[in-house]
Image: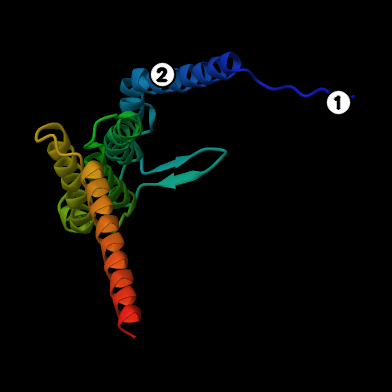
Amino acid sequence: MKRVFIKTNKELEKTKRSKSLLAGSIIALLIAISPYIFYSYQGLPDKPVWETFLFTFESKYQGSVYISGWFLIQKIVPLILLILWFFTCKHWWYHVILIPVAMYCFQIFSTLNDDIQYYDEVEIYYLLPIMLIVIPFVYLIRIKLFDKLVHGIDLKAIERELDEYKEKERLERIKKEEERKKRMSDIH
């Protein structure tokens, strides 16, 4: 005879709470160690080439691994914090956080690309397409929330009323058509 184990609601709730606690602990740890990550560039050598048993890094443009690390860490730490904020934010406007996330991604790309001479100057032009998508989307959400919360307009209730009205009109048309057919049959 096979035994079937079914988790009860209590067990499912306990599993859900433990997963939530683990995720929250990881997020809290990342936020807590972010200052240490921010200053981790200080452990890098102040020379153009850094050789380890895993890789060799050569800083061509900045001339120093220390400076390259400083540039990179200045972008990575805020990016990590913004991504954490994006995934944990419960506000209706959280999509707007994608704009600075995209900006930091472009800046990291610029930092890693040794051929670029000017940093933090042209990223705004690359952000325009992202902004053109995110901002109207967030504004649409804001309008729907504003209508519902401030004006008391429930769009689903209005849609249900319109559907009921359309159904009533359809039934009236069917009824009129049947009456017309009945009159036509009475005439013949």
**Residue 115 image position (x, y, % from top left):** 29, 59
**Residue 107 image position (x, y, % from top left):** 26, 47
Report the side of 121 relative to 18 (left or right).
Answer: left
Q: In which quarter of the image is the N terminus?
A: top right
Residue 29 bears which disc, if any?
2
Query: Residue sitting at 18 percent across and 37 percent down?
Result: 145
Residue 185's image quarter?
A: bottom left
Query: Residue sitting at 23 percent across and 52 percent down?
Result: 162
Q: What amino acid is labelled 2 in the image?
A: Leu
Secondary structure category for the residue under label 2: helix
Query: Residue sitting at 52 percent across and 38 percent down?
Result: 52
Report the side of 139 relative to 108 (left or right).
Answer: left
Closer to the camera in the image, 114 or 161: 161
> Is 179 drawn above or below residue 83 in the view shown?
below
Q: Which of marks 1 and 2 is in front?
A: 1
Q: Cβ–Cβ below 8 Å for labels 1 and 2?
A: no
Closer to the camera in the image, 174 or 180: 180
Question: Counting other residues with Cα less than 10 Å from the Cα at mark 2, is it few (<14), some (14-19), or many (20 or more)?
Answer: few
